[in-house]
Image (cartoon, helix red, strand yellow):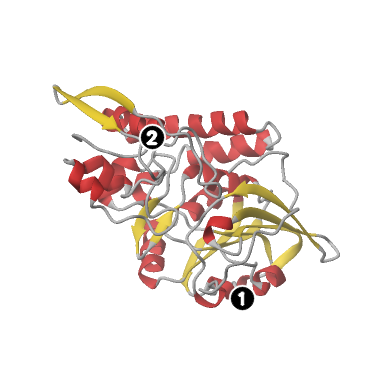
Amino acid sequence: MSFVNACVLLGRVRPASRKARLIPLTFKWKESGHAQRTVLKAGAAALFTGTLFQAATATSTAQVANAAPPSRYGDGTWLNLSLMQQIVADQHRSFAEKRREMVDSIRRELNTVTPAVDGDRLEAVLSVIGTVPREQFVPRPVRPYAYLLTPLKIGYDQTISDAYIVAIMTVELHLPLNAEVLDVGTGSGYQAAILSPFVRRVSSIEIVKPLADAAAKRLRHLGYRNVDVRAGDGFAGWLEHAPFDAIVVAAGASAVPQPLLDQLKPGGRLVMPIGPTTPQEQLLVIKKGTDGTLTRCSLGWTMFVPLTGRGMRSSNNRGVSEPGIPSCHGADVT
């Protein structure tokens, strides 16, 4: 990396606010015996105008300036100083070392945000995340960046969620023993791989057939025998495998599809990003009572790729976020 002009976001910024204090920053490092210097200049916009891969491989200011702006969260990345420093520090680390550091980072951040997250469940999920080779779930060119806490493109306008969000969503499912779980939005199969050790079966649906086929093959190769993957519209769920103890949806919509609510067992939980538009999404936990009543709480603001198929938002949707949804933990964890 040579001279790169970008904007620096300090700390974790809620996408819905789009606000951050920007200041010029400079740092130095050595790579292959040659001193490298990157100047990060504050500018008019806070959203980095290129993908993580473009940023990490840019050789000139022009390459970054000419990069296509991200169309939604996940197509690009929020660029902050710690992320850039991690890219540099990770260059000579093994995948195992990067994985351990990623797990430690998730634990530190969640413990800082709120102590109310179930500690036992969190540690169980982190222990699994610490064994899953995330680099196997991203395209080869971006494998060096697999353990950054950021979404990465996997093709077909889809992304792999960052492991921090995967951890939160998995913890909040409150999985019982021998659970049947529906995973909507297979992507590359990473969420299904994290769920696998906790459940009897993961039923995973991906609307993009090439991604579904690749994920099924990848999961079989890696030894995940209790994951079923099929290509289809996740809006309809998987009636043949229903009912489900838990449902996780890795795509945003204006409302939870009714078939998913119908296929959720009494006492079950559904975790999904919901909002009238992508920048107005909140990550919600929907709980179904034993009498079928639904309650919900928010884990905080987030932005996912949109649900496609029958659950796709209208392009004319300009609604406002619903106020008054209680916080699940007294503070946002997203």
Q: Is residue 113 left or right of residue 135?
A: right
Nearer-the-camera pick, 130 or 168: 168
Question: What amino acid type is highlighted by mark number 1?
Answer: Glu
Q: From the viewer's perspective, is 312 left or right of 37? A: right
Q: Position of residue 214 (x, y in %)?
A: 36, 63
State which quarter of the image contains the N terminus: top left
Which numbered disc covers residue 240? 1
Q: Secondary structure at mark 2?
A: helix
Q: Is residue 26 visible?
A: yes
In which quadrant is the C terminus drawn? Answer: top right
Rendered image: mark on residue 83:
2
In which image quadrant can residue 159 be found? bottom left
Q: Residue at x 46, y 54 (%)?
A: 224
Residue 180, quarter of picture: bottom right
Determine the CA span between mark 1 and mark 2: 43 Å
Answer with left or right where residue 100 lies relative to residue 118. left
Q: Residue at x 39, y 72 (%)?
A: 209
Q: Are marks 1 and 2 in contact (CB under 8 Å)?
A: no
Determine whether 141 is above or below 98 in the image. below
Of all residues shown, which one is farthest toward the bottom? Answer: 310
Q: Earlier in the sequence, mark 1 or mark 2?
A: 2
- At a point 47% along the width and 60% down the height, the residue shown is 305
Point out residue 139 in the picture as x, y percentages from the top left corner.
30, 53
Q: Residue placed farthest to the front in the image?
A: 44
Query: Residue 219: image x %, image y %?
Result: 42, 57
Depicted 239 relative to depicted 9: above or below: below
Dot 1: element: helix
Q: Residue at x 49, y 71 (%)?
A: 308
